[in-house]
Image: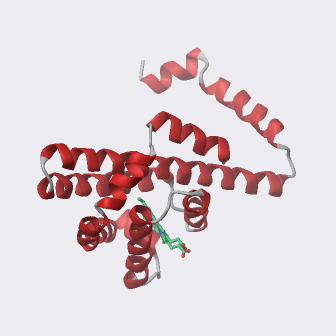
Amino acid sequence: MDEVLQNLLQLTGFSDDDSQILQKARSEIQKWEAGIVKVFYDTLYNYQPTSRLLGDKQRDDMVTSLSRWLKHLVSAEHNENFWKYQCFIGLVHIRRNIPNHLIIAMMSRIQTYFLAQSTYTFSTVEGMRLYVAFKKLTDIVIGLIAEGYFDGYLNAIQKITNLNRELVDRMVIREVEKLLEPKTRQQSQGD
Ligand code: HEM
């Protein structure tokens, strides 16, 4: 995961300045926390395919987890432990059979809500700068959750089947090549 984190930091351009901007605004951001959490769970509970996945978990417990995560996001030091925890969140979601596209969509919700609050509370320039810092950070988190998920999933399959990673990679490429053959390609493009 070190390489994944390095790539995400480099390519998003997340810097100490971004961390500091978020830290400085944290008392303001905390006021938006309840709203973010409400939008998040209203969205998930009001849509059958996602409410089904929340299962028997109590809404209050879920709210506490997400609030804690949000607080941590803007007030914690962005150090090794912080990034490791984001990968761990990927594993928690595998256990619950929650696919990445749902997590990506919900991060988009969080970012959009944050943008509205940020530009409403601060001047346009300051609000946009704060949003950019938050966007970069949450995009890195999404990258780590998605890679944590993928890696965790693949490692589990490797252990179950006793196949090594290179062999699995080669077999996957062979299967994908079949999907990319002109005949299959035409069918998937509807030609
Ligand atoms: C931005 C997207 C998301 C974030 C940041 C997020 C974050 C989290 C966090 C921090 C936890 C607690 C992890 C821990 O135990 O320490 C958690 C658990 C959970 N999340 Fe998410 N989540 C997201 C999206 C979703 C979606 C889309 C669903 C369902 C449709 C979902 C369902 C769950 C469930 C059921 C648990 C409890 C897992 C368990 O305790 O076994 N999450 N999530």
Which residue is at 31% across, 70% downward?
Answer: 37
Residue 180 occupies quadrant: top right
Identify which residue, 138 or 13, lies in the foreground. 13
Total marks placed: 0
Residue 132 occupies quadrant: top left
Residue 32 occupies quadrant: bottom left
Which residue is at 56% across, 23% downward?
Answer: 184
Which residue is at 78% across, 31% downward?
Answer: 170
Which color scheme is applied?
secondary structure
**Where does the C terminus fall, quadrant-wise?**
top left
Compared with residue 31, is residue 106 higher up or lower down, i.e. above or below? above
Identify which residue, 67 or 125, lies in the foreground. 125
Which residue is at 43% across, 62% downward?
Answer: 73
Residue 152 at what x, y percent from top left? 67, 55
Relative to 102, is 125 on the left or the right? left
Relative to 19, is 39 on the left or the right? left
Q: Outermost residue toward the top?
A: 182
Residue 163 at what x, y percent from top left? 85, 46
Residue 36 at what x, y percent from top left? 28, 66
Relative to 176, is 143 on the left or the right? left
Compared with residue 105, is residue 167 higher up or lower down, i.e. above or below? above
Residue 128 at what x, y percent from top left? 22, 45
Compared with residue 89, is residue 38 higher up or lower down, i.e. above or below? below
Compared with residue 40, is residue 130 higher up or lower down, i.e. above or below? above
